[in-house]
Amino acid sequence: MVYTVDALNSFFSTPAIRSLWTDAAVIDAMIRFESALAASQAECGVIPASAADAIVTTCGTFRIDPHQLAAEARNAGTLAIPLMKALKAAVQHVDPAAVAYVHFGSTSQDISDTALLCQARASMDVLERELRRLGDALASQVDRYRTTPVLGRTLLQPAAPVTFGWKVAGWLDAVTRCSEALKAAGDEACTLQFGGANGTLAMHGDAAGAVAHALAGRLGLRTPAMSWHGARDRIARLGSELAILCGALGKIGRDVSLLMQFEVAEAFEPTGEGRGGSSAMPHKRNPVSSMYLLDAANRAPMVAAILTGELASEHERGLGSWPNALPVLADLFDLAGSSLSAAVDIGEGLRIDTDAMQANIDRLYGVVYSEGISLTLSGKLGPAAAARIVGQVCEQAIQQRTPVAELLKAMPDVTAVLDDATLDRLASPAAQVAACQPMCDAVLRHWRDAHS
């Protein structure tokens, strides 16, 4: 039940995220809850100020061996029970009269869920900074390459050219949506859990609402309308958005790894000493950032499904549907942190070979412009004749390694209705490049308006 740091798996996360989910961080978040609870209860007249002082003082210096805590939690079914036992023993040394007020009117799920969401709040802050960095990097790439033609590829086959900036704008558009959706889910999820034994806070009497508000304020969380022991939708929604973010960033990894293939060689991850090497083949430079992106995209949805699968919990508090939120959310934040770090690495360091992009277009001899040529000829000669002519010249172009435009200029039926300049224009990326610009503008405007 306790989430421990495994050094050999740490390269699937980032130091900033990992530091927020260590054993020490979990325990600190739980003790912070108890300290803030005592202070809030004293402020609202629920417990004596002297008791609160003793509890807050003890929490400031409290330490416990996580291995011991984990062993005892295995029997108790929750970290909260052995942790409160140890905290009460520590308070006993400071003020025996204060022991009765440790964890007063609260329950195991209150401390577990609230501490978890304090960690989530801190993790969200890290992700939001990285999302801003990623979006800014992608926006710069859109600006730089918005008129640079590159083959469009549909069903893994060549299509009419787009621009590389337009392609990156597709990544940025998804990042913008994910950033907004994740922030909304995170803000909603970071809500105080405080209900006491059955969720009603009956032990607090008329002061229940005031204590909850004060406690939430001290912890930087939202105050809910009611406790939510049996309602796991907030956490499930946050987990789902983390998984969606990983999936959307995985799209970047998929595209870049395909563009890095030697046979394509249009875009490359940044290079560096020891980066992407092979233990057997010295010539290789593997797409390691793309690997991390695809790893997270593959794993995160299955992890998030645990949380959505627990929404139908039993009555006021479900069995087994809340203690596991700690390792599950820890895994999801690890994956999201890893994914964002890899995406930033690509966004800021992507290397582009515009000559290779043009060469890959040229070696198709203009067949990728067949749609525009066919539509224009249809208006002059009719659909049937246009389909026959364009199909014929596309086949000849590949076989004879001759540009489509040159073959069309040799066909009297075509030259009778279209001049050479029109044929050259139809067999160029000009129309596609122009069509990309309004979409690039819209995506850039959306990102910059949201982050100005």
Image (cartoon, grey):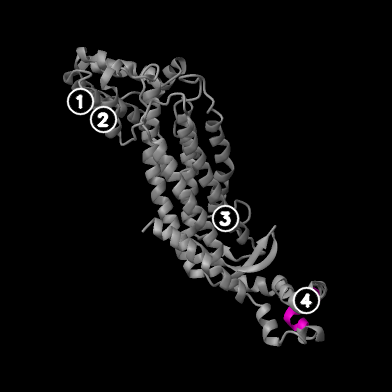
Q: Is residue 139 left or right of residue 40?
A: right
Magenta part mainly helix, strand or loop? Answer: helix
Whether residue 19 is visible, yes or no, is no
Q: In this view, does 440 lie to the left or right of 426?
A: left
Residue hosting label 3: 287
Q: In which quarter of the image is the C terminus?
A: bottom left
The magenta segment is 397-408
Q: Which amino acid does label 4 sit on?
A: Ala
Point out the tag, 3 or 4, that comes first from the N-terminus.
3
- SS at mark 2 in the image: helix
Q: What residue type is labelled 1?
A: Glu
Point out the tag, 2 or 3, that comes first from the N-terminus.
2
x then y, percent, for residue 88 = 28, 16
Task: Count residues near mark 2 (Cα–Cα under 10 Å), then give few for <14, some for 14-19, many for 20+.
Answer: some
**Mark 2–mark 1 contact, CB under 8 Å?**
yes
- SS at mark 4 in the image: helix
Residue hosting label 1: 43
Residue 207 to residue 357: above or below? above
Residue hosting label 4: 397
**Mark 2–mark 3 contact, CB under 8 Å?**
no
